[in-house]
Amino acid sequence: MYKIGVYDRYLSTAGGGERYSCKIAEILSKDKKYKVDLLTDLHTDLDLVSKRLNLDLKNVNLKIFPFLSDDYSKRITQNYDIFINATYLSSLPAAAKRNIYLCYFPTPFDVDFKIVHKLLLTFFRIPATKLFKLAEKINNDFANIEVLEGVYDVKRFMLRRGSFTSGKALILYKYLYKYNNTYNKYNKNNKYNKKYSKFSDASIIIGLKNPKSLGVNQIKCKISLYKEINLNKEIKKNIENIEDIKNIGNIKDIGNIEEDKNKKNNKNNIIDRFQLIFSQDLIVHKGQKQIIDLSKILSQINKNLTISNIVNISDDAKTKDIKKTKDITKTEDVTKTEGDIKTKGAAETKDSAKIDKAQSNFLVTVESDVFSVNKEKKGQVDSRKLGIVIYNEQKISFFKKLILKVLGFIPLFLITYPKNLNFLQTYHKIISISEYSYYWIKKLWKKESDILYPPVEVESFEPSKKENIILSVGRFFPEHHNKKQLEMAQVFIEMYKENAELLKDYKLILAGGVENKKEHLEYIEKIKKVCDGYPVDVLTNIKWNDLKELFSKSFIFWHAAGMGEDENKSPEKFEHFGITTVEAMASGCICIVINKGGQPEIIQNGINGFLFDSWEQLKKITLDVCLGKVDVKMITENALLRAKDFSSENFKSKLINIIESELERIKSKKH
């Protein structure tokens, strides 16, 4: 089975880029030869994302991957056969066997920077970078802790700050054990027994807090500690039934190991590989923080550790070690010495294998009541299900804790902003999403790319009885490549005033997703204020089925991203492709879109839609359509045919060809 990681930092926004990345994950996850992880930096409800994007992600594993450092990124990405970076404006270096960079557009990384950002970058980039490197050492390179699921902000947790959970958090702790260089004889059951002395920095201390801001009097919690069950290859070969397994390493509570032998290793059965060793129920009152120290339990476990119950030692090393020791014991008595195996009257045995370290994995689960805050702020509701706040309370000095505290307030762009394009050297292939993106990647980055048009669920859309609706769909944000919703609203109001009788039954609907960011919400409010008293509806974060219905009954579709901008000076401000345009075509809308960016690749002017170069031209074409001066039937039929060229099936076929080509390179070791 091949491991594939798809990285989308902005997964929670569920925009057009997220539909692209998640469609990749969906397609590949349905093939049994692929194990697919969807990586993002904040915990996201994958079921909610699936519903909003109308995708089936049940076979996809969600993995929280906060950017902490280049080295941390390398440790995460190197575990994959293929790593696909599908994050807009990402400079993340990758270290998988084959790495693919999905480029929506080669936008300058400082495109949104204001003077304050540039000043911070100039004076604080180097100190911030050094602090993050120091934090890596403080946190043992972040290597021994992996948040599997259920912690909303993993970066905060890693930096020893609190983060809300989703009601069930799973955290994996990996510890190295060092052995005392002594060998014990085989006992009468022919068991190899190699003692380990202690493990490095074995400390699991969890803080649980019920913050006053949550407004909950008490939260019921349960914290559990599990130890991974060791079943190495040699042992598994000789297992005849479940009773044999229970005799290994004195394991009594075996869980679902017998069933697990025939199951896939997926996100739903990770606990099946662990043995419960501790559990405690708690009640955390409002404003209270409780510390749970599991270190003493680890110490008790450590006292009786042997090679048979340490996990993740190389199976080949153990087999070789056991075999050679057996050969010695058959002929001579074995005497224990410091660091070596010697036979009575014989020279030092040079072939004796040495295992200096072994890794044991522990799983901590934190379950708690969950609460829906549902606090509204400027029309945006926080609908997350929040559980207990969790802290990593491993003991460190006050100085180290202070450094980690400071890091939590350092803007991430100081670390992630690339000084150059060297990160692209870590990628083996670049994918562009249109001819427009292809052209600018080659011009700005001097790189070739393969065009893979975004997938559009054209089969999900169909025309219905049309209403006098002019529709525009796109995320609401005021930055560089915004969709010009404010300007379109102003144009419609002008048209409405000038053609009151013709447009008396028409209305403009602006629909799209919006993030819970101050500037984005203020942009929404600005549009609503301008439209007050006119037939303009602003719909945010609507459900997929509601959006499809809206498309199907809308008569006209507008798209104006980039209008008024200079394509040569700011090419990133234009639509790089135009998924919503294709969706509108598949719904039988008359599309009137800007004659810039990726739109002309989709629309043939006067054949399957219309292109405009000015606001006045947009108004004229729209009025002609409303007056019946165009052949609506012909335009609609051609649009329905053109939309099929961008279907998910065509996307799937081309995607699989790309992935299989990369796998062939892995097999032939040409990467």
Image (cartoon, rainbow, N blue to C red):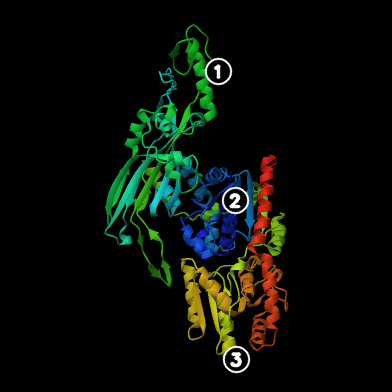
Q: Dot 2 corresponds to which residue?
A: 31
Residue 153 place in picture, x, y as percent:
44, 54
Circle 1 is placed at which residue position?
A: 351
Q: Which residue is drawn at 62% across and 49% down?
A: 423
State whether residue 631 appears in this view: yes
Q: Nearer the viewer, mark 2 or mark 1?
A: 2
> Would residue 173 appear left or right of 416 to someone viewing this image?
left
Considering only order in the chain, which callout, 3 or 1, is on the residue closer to the N terminus? 1
Q: Which of 546 and 74 is in front in this view?
A: 546
Residue type at mark 1: give it: Asp
Is 561 drawn above or below residue 347 in the view shown? below
- Residue 259 % position (x, y): 45, 41
Q: Which mark is residue 376?
A: none
Of pointers 2 and 1, the one earlier in the residue sequence:
2
How packed is label 3: few (under 14 Cα within 10 Å), some, or many (20 or more)?
Answer: few
In the displayed orientation, state which residue is furthest to the front. Answer: 241
